[in-house]
Amino acid sequence: MSSTAKYHLGKASYVINLIEGLKAEGVEVQKLIRKSSLRYFNLDDPESMIPIPVIYEFFELVQNDQGIDNMGLQFQKLFSLESIGAYGELLGSSKKILPAILNALKYEKLNLTHDNCEFKILDGKHAFYGNRYGAAPSKGQDFLNALDLSIILEFVKNSNDKGWCPVEIHLVDNNTSIIEQVFPNCQSKTLVNQEKYGLVFKTEMLSNSLLSDKNFAAMQTNLAPAPITLTGKIENLFDTLSPKNLPGINEVASMFNTSTSSIKRNLKEEGVSFSVLLERWRFMKGVELLTNTDLKINEISDRLFYNNPSNFIRAFKRSTGFSPNSFRG
């Protein structure tokens, strides 16, 4: 396992969908957000990425605050292919089962960087498609498992064989309620406490067309890959944070559920320190915002977590020899 394998990210869409569902039920969501590390993040963009432990933390906070025994069962209907962004659209726009599975494998890290998808032909007549996350079990992970399983089940229900049921359904726990909700009349064999959750189905199913009442746009295959290095993941985290909400290295370590010394050590292995990484990101993001937006200098300063515009102006001029306004022309 690489030294950065534990630093995982997930799409903000997972918490945004849950937040919208809670609001619809009259829950005071902002109070819950303030209690969690989500308070650092800008939750306007469902395609942005958040550390997985932060997502788990919020799921567990909701479960405990609302006294919910089965989060997956209660909130399953909030999640579908179209609700999880570009990755869901990519799968939904596939014409047949097999291309959809191959796209899921190719872009498995796009939604959750700890995804570990598997597809194999078992005996010539049956195939298996499933997933197992690398993180340790938790209530938050259980909820995410249930959501992803329900999305897969809903997805395969969109085949042109309306009476289709999997031959087997594999669960990593013993909670079968999601299956009963999505496939109420299905006679599939259910195996509990498995290493991965997934489906066993007849290989002839792979050629089935996908039918959907959703109008998925045809997706391009040049989707931006998820960051692999810790440097890339922290830069991604900076992109996602709310203006003026810059956490220090201790808070970043907490978001990834690790120690500050581990963060420092792994960054050192990549040839960078936290402070240098932050300054490099500020410079690159500053150039991007000056070039591609009409944001005012004080707005860009806020986006880059400077205390005031003067600090941004000095830092940018030190790096380029130009003031931000002169650079912008």
Image (spheres, rainbow, N blue to C red):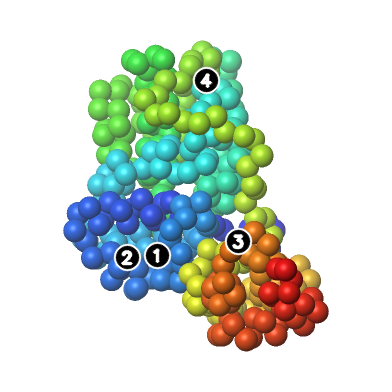
Q: Amino acid at mark 1?
A: Glu
Residue at image position (30%, 32%) is: 182
Q: Amino acid at mark 2?
A: Leu
Q: Residues within 10 Å of mark 1 (few under 14, many from 20)?
A: many
Q: Residues within 10 Å of mark 3 (few under 14, many from 20)?
A: few
Q: Which mark is residue 293?
A: 3
Residue at image position (49%, 36%) is: 89
Q: Nearer the viewer, residue 311 or 190?
A: 311
Return the disc, 4 or 2, that comes first in the chain's sequence.
2
Residue 135 visible in the picture: no
Q: Secondary structure at mark 3?
A: loop
Q: Which mark is residue 57?
A: 1
Decide: is 200 above or below 111: above
Q: CA distance from mark 1 to mark 4?
A: 36 Å
Q: Nearer the viewer, residue 55 or 12?
A: 12
Q: Which mark is residue 61?
A: 2
Specify whether 23 is left or right of 202: left
Q: CA distance from mark 1 to mark 2?
A: 6 Å
Tag 4 residue: 96
